[in-house]
Amino acid sequence: MSLTGLLAAIAVVGGVGLFIGLFLGVAAIKFKVEVDEKEEAVLAVLPGNNCGGCGYPGCSGLAAAIAKGEAEVNACPVGGEPVGLKIAEIMGVEAGESKRMVAYVSCQGDCDKAKIDYEYTGIEDCRMLSFVPNGGAKSCDYGCLGYGSCVKVCPFDAIHVENGIAVVDKEACKACGKCIAVCPKNLISLIPYDAKYVVACASKDKGPVAMKVCDVSCIGCQLCKRNCESEAVVVENFNATIDQEKCIACGKCMEVCPRKSIVEHK
């Protein structure tokens, strides 16, 4: 190739490169997406678990909602109060009161206490048990199946199956709610971290039936309700529940429960 041809080729390549550079520069300016500085600052403070426990699609979704004023500054259950305070400072608002919540499995019908109808051999996933007779091998239709669907979805290793039932480690739980969403028996709910007493049964069977299928089933006898000074216990559908806002942690409900279905929240 002659020198003239070489110089021409260099000029063409250089010209094309310059054109592309200018085009990209103009495009970057023209199509620039404005970023909310507060949104970026909030996102940097959030823990980054992207668990969805806040109700938004990941931490970026929550950060955007907080920056727009569509979500509370303490809406992240994983970060809790410390993160809420930092976000409140970024947004220039008061954080407000934040109560730590944890998941709780309302069942203590383990392999020693709950009766079984048959031996189950198959896929160990609670969600699949709806396709087998009686919804599972346990005689109680409301009890924990113990195959760990909740364990598999927990991103914090806060829930484990112990002797046939799921148990939450409240120190590790971040209240993301994934275990709640996956439980086919609707046994898991969020309760205050500092709740003192809980009803560890979700059975809605009448007393005689409940007594036959589990040694620690609630039978709706109402002794707990009648002995509660703060009117925190409600009995509906043969099952007791405790209003944690009203509970004064006196322990009388647990003392009088003949089935030991009310326990301390440890």
Image (cartoon, rainbow, N blue to C red):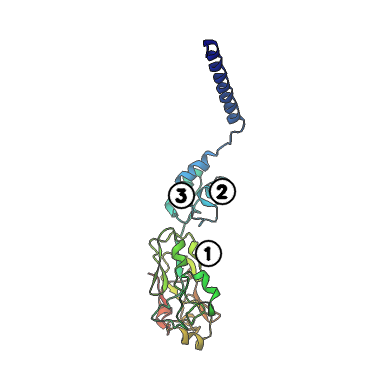
221 over 10 or under it: above or below: below
Percent position of residue 242, x then y: 48, 73
Q: Secondary structure at mark 1?
A: helix
Give the crowd class for mark 2: few <14, some 14-19, many >=20 residues within 10 Å.
Answer: some
Q: Secondary structure at mark 3?
A: loop
Contact, mark 3 vs mark 2 (Cβ under 8 Å): no
Q: Secondary structure at mark 2?
A: helix
Question: Which residue matches tag 3?
Answer: 48
Contact, mark 1 vs mark 3 (Cβ under 8 Å): no
Question: Which residue matches tag 1?
Answer: 181
Percent position of residue 227, x then y: 46, 81
Of marks 2 and 1, which one's residue comes earlier in the chain?
A: 2
How far is disc 2 from disc 1 in space, using C-alphas? 22 Å
How far is disc 1 from disc 3 in space, using C-alphas? 20 Å
Give the crowd class for mark 3: few <14, some 14-19, many >=20 residues within 10 Å.
Answer: few
The residue at the far bottom in this view is 208
Q: Amino acid at mark 2?
A: Ala
Residue 194 in view: yes
Question: Which residue matches tag 2?
Answer: 65
How far is disc 3 from disc 2 in space, using C-alphas? 15 Å
Q: Measuring 45% from the left and 61% from the top, which residue is drawn there?
A: 154
Q: Quadrant of residue 148?
A: bottom left
Would residue 156 be found to the left or right of residue 55 on screen?
left
Residue 245 in view: no
Report the mark closest to the observer, 3 or 2: 3
Report the mark closest to the observer, 2 or 1: 1
Q: Amino acid at mark 3?
A: Gly
